[in-house]
Image (cartoon, rainbow, N blue to C red):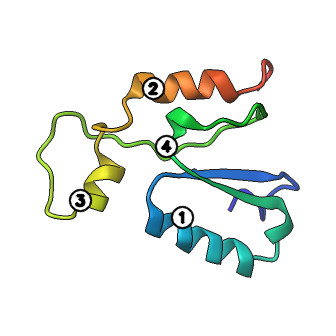
Amino acid sequence: MAAQNSGATITAVELDEQAAQQALGNFTDSPWAKRLRLIHCAIQVVTTNQCFDCIVTNPPFFQQAFKGIDPRRNLARHTDTLTFTDLAKAIAQHLNDNG
């Protein structure tokens, strides 16, 4: 959605292998494919030196909560592997000074 409503170049970060593969397929099929890039890893280990004007996140939001039976869904929704502190550090590291 961000790509279709702006001329921005979009860099996505995705931890989950299946979600990353699906995103790559969606990127390839997109009219904005030339402006879309995917980094498949945890946000805590992104090694790009690039800084961004805007960072949009879909962070995990459950802390110390009961988990469901789907481990992939739990990974996406719970802060076990991405704490709010780690997310804030990654944003601070990759956001432009005026971002």
Q: Which residue type does callout 3 highlight?
A: Pro
Give the percent coordinates (x, y) of residue 75: 31, 51
In the image, residue 88 above or below residue 75: above
**Which of pointers 3 and 4 lies earlier in the amino acid sequence?**
4
Q: Which residue type does callout 4 highlight?
A: Ala
Q: Which residue type does callout 2 highlight?
A: Asp
> Which residue lies most toward the left here?
66
Alpha-carbon distance for marks 1 and 3?
A: 16 Å
For residue 62, side relative to residue 9 (left or right):
left
In the image, residue 68 above or below residue 18: above
**Which of pointers 1 and 4 lies earlier in the amino acid sequence?**
1
**Neighbour tally class for label 3: few under 14, some 14-19, many 20 plus, Cα within 10 Å:** few
The residue where tag 3 is placed is: 71
Give the percent coordinates (x, y) of residue 73: 29, 59
The residue where tag 4 is placed is: 42
**Tags 2 and 3 in contact by the CB under 8 Å rule?**
no
Q: Which residue type does callout 1 highlight?
A: Ala
**Which of pointers 1 and 3 lies earlier in the amino acid sequence?**
1
The residue where tag 1 is placed is: 20
The residue where tag 2 is placed is: 86
Alpha-carbon distance for marks 1 and 4?
A: 11 Å
Q: Which residue is drawn at 28% across and 43% down?
A: 78
**Which of pointers 2 and 4 lies earlier in the amino acid sequence?**
4
Alpha-carbon distance for marks 2 and 3?
A: 21 Å
Q: Which residue is drawn at 64% across and 70% down?
A: 24
Alpha-carbon distance for marks 3 and 4?
A: 16 Å
